[in-house]
Image (spheres, rainbow, N blue to C red):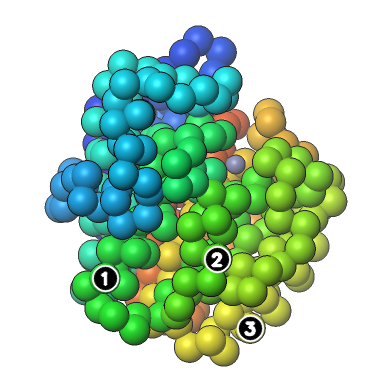
Amino acid sequence: MGRVFSDLRTAEYGASGHPEAPFRVKDTFAMLRAAGHQPEKPSLHASAVDVALLHGPSHLASIKSGTFSDPDTPPFPGIDEIALISLSGALSAADAAMKGEPSFSLMRPPGHHAGKDRVAGFCYLNNLALSVARLQKAQPGLKVAIVDFDVHHGDGTQSLVLGRENTTFLSLHQFPLYPGTGLDSRGNCWNVPLEAGTAGDAWLREFEPRLELLLREKPDVLAVSAGFDAYKEDPIAGLKLDKGTFKRIGSLLAQTKLPRYAALEGGYSEDLPILVESFLDGFF
Ligand SMILES: [Zn+2]
């Protein structure tokens, strides 16, 4: 079984009626534990140095002071510290993956819409992109394939890794939908827009050949933005994946036998805990 990094302090913020809510970590933590996983605190502690790998020099300070404006992404008190804990989970998962242990970061806030100087779409720091940058700083030349299966386009991640050496980004997402990007592929960023209503089998038919192409790039590690809002019951999007699809995605990624890790992105249905468990069943 792989490793799960989590910290219940990341369930300690929220706004009433906001879909990105504390239960996402709290209930999933409880279910994973009941299923035999042993969520542990991150082994690495993210700092401003890690944030500066890709974000602008004043980004963290602006999160701390709340001097930003995005209606979806409020300036909660202490959110800078909580975002660093969330980032710590992704960094720890990446580190464990490189030691041969498939790993998952169960944290919030998510990250894939956060850009260089931009909070957006419930995201403050781009956890996954930063974890990739940290791995590549430690091991120059390391080839990383990023897979983003969140229902929304990972626009923040794309903006941070576009043109980056030894890095390929693959995103499958509903289009049109927030954030309105990801219709076309650009360089090392491969986008697969999908119509509302696309179900699991059709989704997998798009995914499998792209994963094969990704493997031809001979990546050393797979970094996964694991969003579960493509689920058929998700309240904020319109794809129709079911629990079994997420297990299949996990299995296909595991079959690569590559070092691999994933970090939680979206997923707003109350079924999120069983979707994560199902994914990890395949992924570990
Ligand atoms: Zn999403």
Amino acid type shown at disc 1: Lys
Circle 2 — which element?
Answer: loop
Circle 1 — which element?
Answer: helix
In the image, taking residue 77 as reference, residue 189 lies left or right, namely right
* Sequence-first disc among 1 and 2: 1
Instruction: Report the residue at 31% width, 44% height from top.
Output: 57
Circle 3 — which element?
Answer: helix
In the image, taking residue 77 as reference, residue 257 lies left or right, namely right
Q: Which residue is mark 2?
A: 162
Q: Which residue is mark 3?
A: 213
* Sequence-first disc among 2 and 3: 2
Quarter of the image where ligand 1 sits:
top right
Q: Which residue is mark 1?
A: 137
Residue extending farthest to the top is 16
Question: Which of the 4 image quarters holds residue 192?
Answer: bottom right
Give whichever of 130, 163 is nearer the camera: 163
In the image, taking residue 238 as reference, residue 34 lies left or right, namely left
Instruction: Report the residue at 71% width, 55% height from top.
Output: 182
The image shows residue 263 at horizontal and vertical percentages of 41, 52
Residue extending farthest to the front is 57
Question: Which of the 4 image quarters holds residue 94?
Answer: bottom left
Amino acid type shown at disc 3: Leu
Q: Is residue 201 visible?
A: no
Residue mark closest to the camera, 3 vs 1: 1
C-alpha gap between disc 3 and disc 1 = 25 Å
Looking at the figure, which quarter contains the N terminus? bottom left
